[in-house]
């Protein structure tokens, strides 16, 4: 299976982001990809809650979702929209950070709301409180794309290995980790975390990422790490996209999952224990 990871530098303008995203997805399909993946918050990277309130839409109204569903059908590809920032109608005003798996017919096959919120202080000048603007999801999601089963996650989820073990044990052979990773934590942990999740589960890990400095019409500009990765079940890095925006392809030998698990069958060898 050929996959294409779309590496974006999204701004806080959903319309402009959509035009670039459509062009890159077309490019991935032109390169023969059957499965194209975009990063976290494909539609809008913004640190301003007031700006988000002004430009974000609900799932039913969202123009990015509608356009990309149509594009997947036109190109006859599987498409992971890494995530969209969406209004929810919740009384507290918080948004959803929601990933969508779209079929070659343009149908929404699966939705996943990010479970783990990025509430951290990564340095003296860089603090995030994702839970103040987004409400967390509460369920793990797997979906069949014909040749493989996909387990869906988003960004900060990657630090919680039990989620990935659960997805693998539910049948996933591909784990998706669309991200907008901090440069500080990315430089320290990105490759190690993604390779670990692949090795622990015997799964392919596909992590399309936001990259660079994100233009903002309101509030502070964000910066993200880039380096979209595709990792094989044995932990080999098949693709490292570096820091330039663009479309990057890799070919997955889906039988590698069975081979890795036969050599080290740890993903299915949990032993109950007590204590602590």
Image (tube, grey):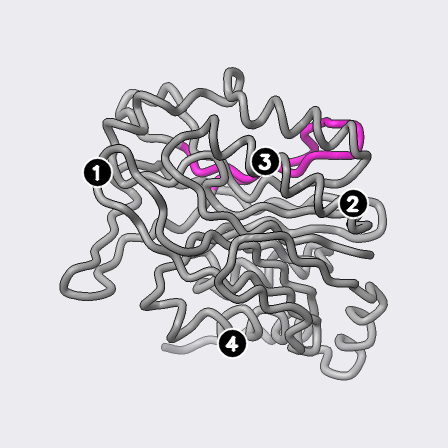
The disc placed on residue 193 is none
Q: Quadrant of residue 21?
A: top right
> Quick check: 61 above or below 117?
above
Q: CA distance from mark 2 to mark 1?
A: 37 Å
Give residue 132's position: percent from left, percent from top: 25, 39
In magenta stretch: residue 103: yes
Which tag is nearer the camera, tag 1 or tag 4?
1
Element on which disc 2 rests: helix
Task: State which tag comes first along the sequence, 2 or 3.
Answer: 2
The residue carrying mark 4 is 273
User: How many numbered dots are placed on residues in this image?
Assistant: 4
Which residue is the site of mark 1?
Answer: 219
* Magenta region includes residue 208: no
The CA distance from mark 1 to mark 4 is 49 Å
Disc 2 crowd rating (10 Å Cα; few below 14, some 14-19, many 20+) is few
Of residues 83 and 17, the one nearer the viewer is 17
User: For the residues carrying marks 2 and 1, which lies nearer the camera in this image?
Assistant: 2
Tell me the distance, in whole angstroms, between the alpha carbons under discs 2 and 3. Answer: 26 Å
- Circle 3 residue: 111
Which badge, 2 or 1, comes first in the chain's sequence? 2
Q: Is residue 23 left or right of residue 10?
A: right
Along the viewing direction, whichever of 99 and 7 lies nearer the viewer:
7
Q: Secondary structure at mark 4?
A: loop
How far across and how far down the image is residue 232, in percent? 70, 71
Give coordinates of residue 113: x percent, y percent. 49, 39
Dot 4: within a 10 Å radius of its alpha carbon, few (fewer than 14), some, or many (20 or more) residues?
Answer: few
Which portion, as a residue range, is magenta? 96-113
Write down the residue under mark 2: 30
């Amino acid at each position: 299976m050929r996959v294409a990871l779309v590496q974006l530098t999204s701004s806080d303008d959903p319309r402009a982001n959509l035009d670039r995203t459509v062009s890159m997805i077309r490019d991935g399909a032109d390169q023969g990809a059957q499965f194209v993946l975009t990063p976290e918050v494909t539609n809008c990277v913004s640190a301003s809650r007031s700006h988000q309130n002004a430009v974000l839409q609900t799932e039913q109204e969202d123009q990015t979702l509608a356009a990309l569903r149509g594009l997947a059908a036109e190109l006859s590809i599987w498409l992971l929209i890494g995530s969209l920032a969406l209004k929810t109608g919740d009384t507290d005003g918080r948004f959803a950070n929601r990933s969508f798996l779209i079929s070659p017919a343009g149908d929404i096959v699966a939705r996943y709301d990010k479970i783990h919120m990025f509430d951290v202080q990564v340095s003296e000048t860089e603090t995030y409180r994702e839970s103040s603007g987004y409400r967390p999801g509460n369920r793990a999601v797997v979906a069949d794309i014909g040749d493989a089963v996909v387990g869906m996650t988003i960004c900060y989820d990657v630090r919680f290995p039990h989620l990935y073990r659960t997805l693998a044990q539910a049948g996933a052979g591909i784990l998706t980790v669309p991200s907008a990773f901090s440069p500080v934590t990315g430089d320290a942990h990105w490759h190690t975390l993604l390779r670990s999740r692949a090795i622990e589960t015997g799964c392919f890990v596909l992590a399309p990422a936001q990259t660079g400095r994100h233009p903002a019409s309101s509030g502070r500009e964000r910066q993200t790490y880039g380096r979209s990765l595709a990792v094989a079940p044995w932990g080999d890095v098949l693709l490292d996209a570096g820091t330039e925006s663009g479309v990057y392809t890799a070919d997955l030998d889906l039988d590698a999952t069975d081979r890795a698990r036969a050599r080290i069958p740890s993903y299915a060898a949990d032993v109950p224990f007590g204590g602590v």
